[in-house]
Image (tube, rainbow, N blue to C red):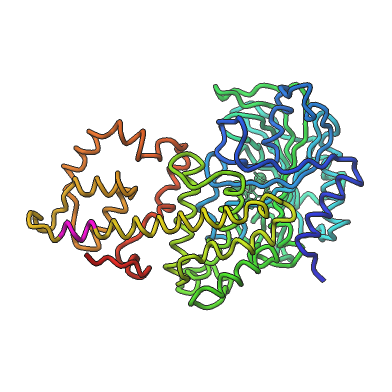
Amino acid sequence: PELPAVQVRSTFLDFFRQKHGHLLVPSSPVRPRGDPSLLFVNAGMNQFKPIFLGTADPRSPMASYRRVVNSQKCVRAGGKHNDLDDVGRDTYHHTFFEMLGTWSFGDYFKEEACRMAWSLLTEHYGISADRLYVSYFGGDAASGLQSDEETRHIWLDMGVPPGHLLPFGLKENFWEMGDSGPCGPCTEIHYDHVGGRDAAKLVNANSPDVVEIWNLVFMQYNREADLSLRRLPQFSVDTGMGLERLVSVLQGKRSTYDTDLFTPLLHALHQRSRVAPYGGRTGSEDQDRVDLAYRVVADHIRTLSVCIADGVHPGMSGAELVLRRILRRAVRFCMEVLQAPQGTLASLVPTVTHLLGDVYPELHREADQIVDVINENEAQFLLSLQQGSRLIQRTLCRKDYKHGVFPASVAWSLHRDLGFPLDLVDLMLEDRGVQVDRQELDRIIAENHKVMSSVTCPVSQVSSEQAGADLSVMLDVLSLAELQRLGVPHTD
Ligand code: ATP
Ligand code: MG
Ligand code: MG
Ligand code: MG
């Protein structure tokens, strides 16, 4: 008998609330309030940043928090924590996920935190200890940070065998909220989905077989704007566990998409599609590409719903731009790969609210709004695609068209007026065996540099890390052949 996700979540909250005196604090919205260092809330600790820094208003309820537990809506699609590129390709990173979190603000520290985590996993959820591996911070000479021997000894005393206890460096075991903000050494619990072998080598190795489930951070520093580390006024504990991953462990599934958090979505999606049902494959064959599309759409519709409910609508800069790309990417996979009709995305919203609305009631409240925003943006996207291909077609029929060389002014107008990334323009032209007048286009770009950065080059407004993810996210990258498959007519 497997534990439904609803019970996995409530068992966690009850364990810390009832058994260990933690106060249950609701999830904050995914749009960060008053923190320009973040695009989206990326961890449960974000809303408590002032407590870590010692800057919480003494009159706010927060000022008296000592032990806290919550289940936080997180989005990792931009900034320091950006998983967009992995989503769909692997079976355990999501753009939206729920983080089950616990905190001690100057109350208990390392030992109690480790003991409670271990007891919950092994005794209450009944996970077998020989499937668990624990990593700890092994120090970093360059930054003068020492190995966290205290934590290593705590785990050894609790009976974790040395072979299951592994040191890692800054990248894996020194958690940081963003380019600046609270940070500290962490110890993480990983789960071996396979068993019956020595899996230590697969920890932190991007293997779907051994997956990180819980991070226990010992907040001791603040990363300052000049990148130096400042000691915090008090030591705190900040832990976070991905609900989707925990549920996959408890339901005996290797993939989060095979749990009851996702199967209803995949099923609803199949009802609308003209392809085979979801098969859970991750390779590179045709059916695998279909499965990837299923995963991307199931992931993205949750993110879209949660973000829109919290007031982040698809738009032209920052978090809004990221959401616009997520929407367009979802539309593209829906129509192009899953062969589902326009309106499919919005049709999944009731399934999302059914799955998550009891925990995050704003989803119920905003359900109509979510549907409208998705439908409007989808229609807008399909319309611009259509207008774009018409414009290209018309240009190629113009009397003054010089064979093979596409006028730069029109390419520019596709970009500026219809919002096509210039790479997409190139691709669309390539399909017609045409090339843009590159020299002239470069001149126009240079000339419009100022206009670009303020109006149509939103990439410059998001962080460089996000920009790195751009190419893959450009739905943006649709060829004309793909357009035809989308059934977008471009007669003129
Ligand atoms: P990973 O190494 O797998 O990318 P992480 O080290 O970036 O995870 P943390 O910042 O330590 O993750 O977050 C705490 C926990 O949140 C993780 O142990 C994991 O269970 C969960 N988590 C992190 N990122 C994601 C994601 N993109 N989707 C689902 N769960 C996630
Ligand atoms: Mg990560
Ligand atoms: Mg990690
Ligand atoms: Mg981690």
Q: Nearer the viewer, residue 432 or 323?
A: 323
Q: What percent of the width, then of the height, locates residue 257?
A: 63, 64
Q: Residue furthest right?
A: 19
Residue under the image location 40 percent in, 56 percent down: 381
In magenta segment, residue 365: no
Residue 172 visible in rendering: no
* Quadrant in which the N terminus appears: bottom right
Query: In the displayed structure, would residue 149 be above or below residue 124?
Result: above
Q: Determine whether, in the image, residue 261 is placed left or right of residue 414.
A: right
Residue under the image location 51 percent in, 66 percent down: 344
Query: In the displayed structure, would residue 351 be above or below residue 67?
Result: below
Q: Nearer the viewer, residue 433 or 349?
A: 349
Q: What percent of the width, then of the height, locates residue 90?
A: 56, 60
Callout count: 0
Q: What percent of the width, then of the height, locates residue 489?
A: 30, 67
Q: Determine whether, in the image, residue 414 is placed left or right of residue 351.
A: left
Most common SS among magenta residues: helix
Residue under the image location 68 percent in, 52 percent down: 212
Q: Determine whether, in the image, residue 393 is placed left or right of residue 323.
A: left
Quarter holding residue 245: bottom right
* Quadrant in which the C terminus appears: bottom left
Residue under the image location 62 percent in, 43 percent down: 30
Residue 463 visible in rendering: yes
Query: In the displayed structure, would residue 354 be above or below residue 313?
Result: below
Q: Nearer the viewer, residue 456 or 92?
A: 456
Range covered by the magenta-colored residues: 391-396
Q: What percent of the width, then of the height, locates residue 25?
A: 78, 40
Quarter holding residue 449: top left
Q: Nearer the viewer, residue 35 or 94?
A: 35
